[in-house]
Amino acid sequence: MLGVTIILVLTIVLINSTVSSLHNYENIIRDSSWILATLVHVPQFLIPFLLICYLTKGSLGEYGFNLKESPPIFTHGRMFGIGALFGLLMSLKYIPQIIEKTPLDIPQPVTLVNIVGTMTFQWIIIGLCEETMFRGLIQTYLMNNLEGWVRITGHDFHIGTVIGAILWGAFHFINILIMPLGSVVFIVVLTTVAGLLMGYAYQETRSLLTTIIIHNTLFGVPLTIGYILYYLL
């Protein structure tokens, strides 16, 4: 699984290098960053999905492609609510801008193409791709092939869940390509903790839909609120 992660990282670096060699690279990053974000996320779905097909001989449900829930806690509705709640908390970043009547922090120029592209990325692509790789392939494989549990805050985490969260957090070091080191370290720590929480949810349901809902809602809600405020204000 570490080897798969390394291969994926090298693939993303290659894509980034190829795009950065284009003469209009800076314009793409400034005006339509969702295009590059989508390009580097596609391999995060395709590579693990093909491996899952190979490992399961087509029985994709064994690696999270199912609609399972684990009531009363881990239901699809509750996961949406949790994702929306944290998304609303992230949306508090708009308050100073609203009070000071300064332009809202929108990722790129507000055009129809950018709105559709960014919303599609945040509400569909990011969760599907990253969860297929790190919860679907890596965590499932580790849970199937390792034994042992870790007690954290009164809950039993499978060792595969813990290792999967660490790998997901470490994977975000790749942001060093576009971010300063301090910001990257913060993201790595944050995603490792989030990986433990989402990994636990997946551990209990064995359904990727559980974590995809949280993942997409967490990022989709603040983006949607940002666009709404942009037009209202």
Image (tube, rainbow, N blue to C red):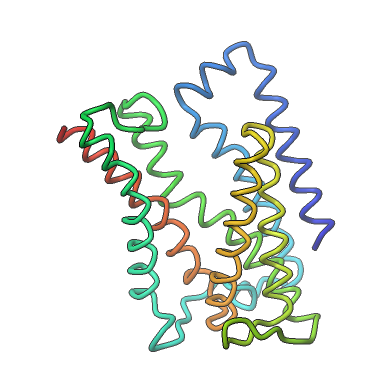
Query: What is the residue that sits farthest to the top in this orientation?
Result: 23
Q: Position of residue 198 (x, y in %)?
A: 54, 69
Q: Position of residue 78 (x, y in %)?
A: 35, 75
Q: Nearer the viewer, residue 2 or 189?
A: 189
Q: Quadrant of residue 180?
A: top right
In the image: residue 101, left or right of residue 58? left
Residue drawn where x is 63% and y is 40% of the image = 40
Q: Position of residue 91 (x, y in %)?
A: 32, 49
In the image: residue 231, left or right of residue 191? left
The image shows a total of numbered marks equal to: 0
Q: Quadrant of residue 75?
A: bottom left
**In this picture, is 105 found above or below 136?**
above
Residue drawn where x is 75% and y is 33% of the image = 14
Q: Quadrant of residue 151?
A: bottom right
Is the N terminus in the top left, top right, bottom left or bottom right quadrant?
A: bottom right
Q: Nearer the viewer, residue 2 or 159?
A: 159
Residue drawn where x is 77% and y is 87% of the image = 148
Q: Position of residue 108 (x, y in %)?
A: 40, 27
Is the C terminus in the top left, top right, bottom left or bottom right quadrant?
A: top left
In the image: residue 80, left or right of residue 6? left
In the image: residue 60, left or right of residue 3? left
Residue drawn where x is 62% and y is 81% of the image = 152
**In this picture, is 67 found above or below 50?**
below
